[in-house]
Image (cartoon, rainbow, N blue to C red):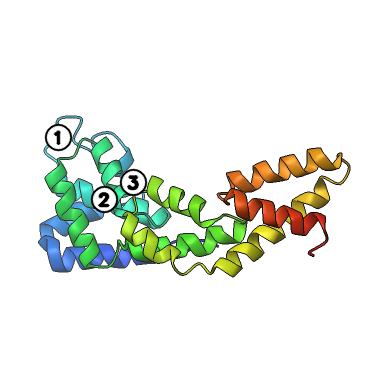
Amino acid sequence: MFPVQDPTAAERARERWSAQALGDEGGRRLGRAVSADDPADGPGADGADGSDADPEAVARAICLRLLTAAPRTRAQLATAMRRKGLPEDVSARVLDRFEELHLINDTAYAEAFIENRKNRGLARRALADQLRQRGVDAAVADEALGEVDPEAEHASALAFAAERFRRFSPLPAQVAVRRLYGMLVRKGYSTAVSSRVIREVVNGGR
């Protein structure tokens, strides 16, 4: 399964922020901001009610809340803060600090994402598209995708096609092949790979 950050990790991160970066008063503000009531989602969390909340404390609270729920990319966190109306320079400073503390790591995110999704029969191209949608830099995505073995990708496509072809057995052969081909292409496989896999499935692996 895709790794989900242990909630205690966010607590430890919060403590580190209080001790290393925020100072006593800042730490108390952040502690309140990511309390069980989760004011990051409530009224005034983003300063919209006219309060004088520290934008950086709000930004940190948003990031920690989201990272506690699931791993996120830098771009996803930046988008969340932008939606809250936080200044870009504030978001950048907070994100930079989170990267220094290894709370954000797009490379690790991409590697874990690929490991999880490739077991669902997705091809490299589909994985690349999904990483791009999540804001992972193209160079980072390409490096992570380089670990995907072409033979393993073919085996994954073959296993997916074989399982689907069995489900289509009541259908006329041409209809089954057409549907299977469309499914493989939507999974991100090239026309060449899709055609090869279908031939193997139809011919019993020969």
Q: Name the amino acid type tagged 2.
A: Ala
User: In this picture, is 153 found above or below 69?
Assistant: below
Which residue is found at the position 36% from the left and 56% from the top? 67
Q: Mark 2 — residue? A: 61
Q: Residues within 10 Å of mark 3 (few under 14, many from 20)?
A: some
Which residue is found at the position 33% from the left and 47% from the top? 76
Which residue is found at the position 29% from the left and 42% from the top? 79
Quarter of the image where one finds residue 154: bottom right
Q: Position of residue 163 (x, y in %)?
A: 76, 55
Q: Is residue 164 left or right of residue 98?
A: right
Q: Secondary structure at mark 3?
A: loop
- Res 21 label: none
Q: Position of residue 66 (x, y in %)?
A: 36, 51
Q: Residues within 10 Å of mark 2 (few under 14, many from 20)?
A: many
- Res 51 label: 1
Q: CA distance from mark 1 to mark 2?
A: 16 Å
Q: Mark 3 — residue? A: 38
Mark found first going from the N terminus, 3 or 1: 3
Q: Position of residue 190 (x, y in %)?
A: 57, 51
Q: Position of residue 35 (x, y in %)?
A: 31, 52
Please state which of residues 73 and 59 is positioned toward the viewer in this rendering: 73
Quarter of the image where one finds residue 54: top left
Q: Residues within 10 Å of mark 1 (few under 14, many from 20)?
A: few
Q: Name the amino acid type tagged 3.
A: Asp
Q: Is residue 7 visible?
A: no
User: In this picture, is 122 found above or below 143?
Assistant: above
Q: Secondary structure at mark 1?
A: loop
Q: Is residue 146 left or right of residue 62?
A: right
Query: Which quadrant is home to the C terminus?
Result: bottom right
